[in-house]
Amino acid sequence: MERSKPRIVLLARSLPKATTAKAAAAAKSKSKSKPKSKARTLTKTTCLLVVLGTLVGILTIFSLSIGHYYHNQYADDLLSRMSGMTAFQSSQSSLNGEASQNSSRTKPQHNAQGSLRDEVTKKDGNGNDKHGNKNPFLIGRDNDDNVLDARHERSVFQSIIDRVEWTEQQCAAIPSDQKNTLKNPFQPITDLPMLPEGGVGPSLQKWLRDNPLSSDGNDNNTNYDESGKAYPTCRLPPSTSCNTSTYTLIMMSHTTSRLHDFMNPLLVMMETWPGLTEVIIVWNSPRETLTSMAENTDAPSPNKKKADRNREIQERQYASQLLQWHNNSTHPLRIFFSLENGLENNLLNRYHPLLQPKNEAIMYFDDDGPFWSKDAMITSGFELWKRNSDVQVGAFPRNIRYMSQRMKDTGRHGVDSSIQAIASNARGVDLSPQTQSKHHHPLTFTPICRNVTGDTVEYNYFVFPDFDAHVLLPSGTFLHRNFLCFIWHPAFEELRTYVVTHKTYPDDMTVSTLISHLSGRAPRTFPREITDGVKEISRNRRMLMLEYDRDEKEERDEDYEEENLNKVDQSHRRLLWKQKNWGKMREEAVNSLTGYFGSIHPGTVGWCAGTPYMQKRGRGVPYVCDPEKPTLDLIPWLKEGGPGYDHCPK
């Protein structure tokens, strides 16, 4: 809002000469009769000028304060338009011990600091420090004041803290007649304590206090993990990565028996998928499990069935082939042996920054699949990730169902807002930390008020909805490498401890929830199956694991193909129910994790959002895509003029 500046207008009025002369004579006479009046007049004039100057000063300060206030309100919006710099690779030396000066440092003692907005440093007008060096984490706001880049970890952490505080305010404002109204309150099923509701807020506040900015504002090496080792400064990735054309594939395994599941699909991907320039196999078992299998030359036991003997021989060949690729310095595949890098057998190892992927884009698959086709993953999925590189993008979504009507209404509002934004060809509802502050929080994150209303959620493991999904299973997901730094950040130690101690090891829920709160946005999904537009013959919609042997594939009949189509899903179902009460334990985990952050993102939107192929649904998830398995020419971000296309036009 513009304010008009106060103007002082001096009006001069002409007087007759005679009148002026008389006045002058009278003044002269008066001055002679009262010699002290001149001094008094001078004093009054001086006082008047002082008062006038004071008023002008107050008005000036008031105007500057108004401008400063509105700058603070909208500075984040300006920063959100700026591409974040990637400080990830430059900071990896501190993790590998390459910078000896960092590894020898002891953790300094810090004084408690205030909020993030108080943690600014004084610099010159160009954002340089006292030595004239440009600070990569600070952007000039005025001549002597700087603010942190909105994608810097400290800004991101403060945004999460603000969201937790906003959630607490929303819960406190719930009318008393809506409190504790659920008929079936949530009951934990394991003996592991639930994470504290909204606990991520105090945890991040403590980290910010214990790890303040250094005096020159450059805190590249002031982060420390639990063991006291230096940890790099994390930064959110840019919102789009249109110029990225290559990606890294990461798969994690721990037993040679899984080689049968992923070696053939892996070979197909390395030979035929464009842009795949690096493959990292995260091996969570000792190296000897691979080498002993590869070096075993003994004949299989004759007591085994022929199929089992053949399988053992093939397993040895796979292990040998994998090690040969790893030992070949020119081959794109390398094995990361977790135990040799100081890590334990942990599902989160595939997200560890020690992997140091050389590409910004990372594609994940589970070692037992499912493996989606090249059209689904690269032609469609990779292109969607380029347009949304600051969120998790995937094809295997799971839904969280709300029990209270308040949460249902808020969640539906969030999905509708996202659809509306995509239909208008916006990049999505801007819930990013850059636009969120204590003064503005959109209602598209759904507050969880477990301690106030008894809020609880259900984990829906029966369907894979494109709309209103809240968790992406790892197989077939894309992630920017900058997120690895956040996932293993010392500030989230409590979160990682919960993953490794809970009986279901909920790494998928944890990663999806954490990334959505870091970015302030929901994940994006793409169709995991693409058809050829003629008819849905099985070879076009089955997993990649059936594509490696084309000659054999042509000989199979339709019934055999349909049986193999569902083989991977059936194995996952058996795994799901392998432990007693597995489903209830997963539900406990999702309640604990979402409660820890205090709110849930608005949910995903399907590939058809903003197109005529989006259809309303009477119950369950609000919308579906029809057809469920589209042809490539229906994917909107691949079509000129379609929603999302202009974000990375070809």
Image: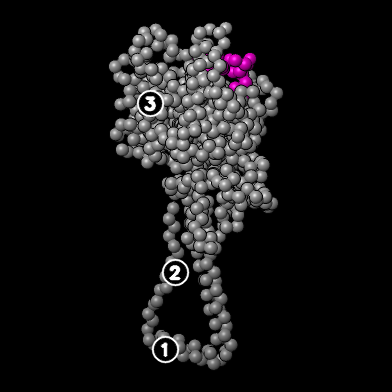
Q: Main secondary structure of the magenta part?
A: helix
Q: How far apart are marks 2 and 1 (CA)?
A: 29 Å
Disc 3 vs disc 2: which is toward the camera?
3
Residue at 54% across, 82% down: 42
Upstream in sequence: badge 3 or badge 1? 1
In the rendered image, which residue does mark 3 sit on?
374
- Asked if residue 51 is positioned above or below residue 397 in the image, the reply reads below
Name the secondary structure under disc 3: helix
User: Is residue 571 highlighted in magenta?
Assistant: yes
Name the secondary structure under disc 2: loop
In the rendered image, which residue does mark 1 sit on?
21
Type of the residue with mark 2: Ile
Type of the residue with mark 1: Ala
Assess whether mark 1 and mark 2 are in contact (beta carbons under 8 angstroms): no
- Asked if residue 476 is positioned above or below residue 71 in the image, the reply reads above
Find residue 99 and report its horizontal and vertical position in percent.
58, 49
What sort of colour scheme is used for the picture? one colour
Q: What stretch is highlighted in magenta?
A: 569-588
10 Å crowding of disc 3: few (<14), some (14-19), many (20+): many
Residue at 70% across, 23% down: 191
Residue at 58% across, 51% down: 219
Residue 280 in sight from this viewpoint: no
Quarter of the C terminus within the rendering: top left
In this rendered view, identify the residue nearer to me: 287 or 500: 287
In this rendered view, identify the residue nearer to me: 392 or 202: 392
Upstream in sequence: badge 2 or badge 1? 2
Disc 2 vs disc 1: which is toward the camera?
2
Disc 3 vs disc 1: which is toward the camera?
3
Name the secondary structure under disc 1: helix
Q: Distance between the residues labelled 3 and 2?
A: 72 Å
In the rendered image, which residue does mark 2 sit on?
8
Q: In this view, does 154 lie to the left or right of 86?
A: right
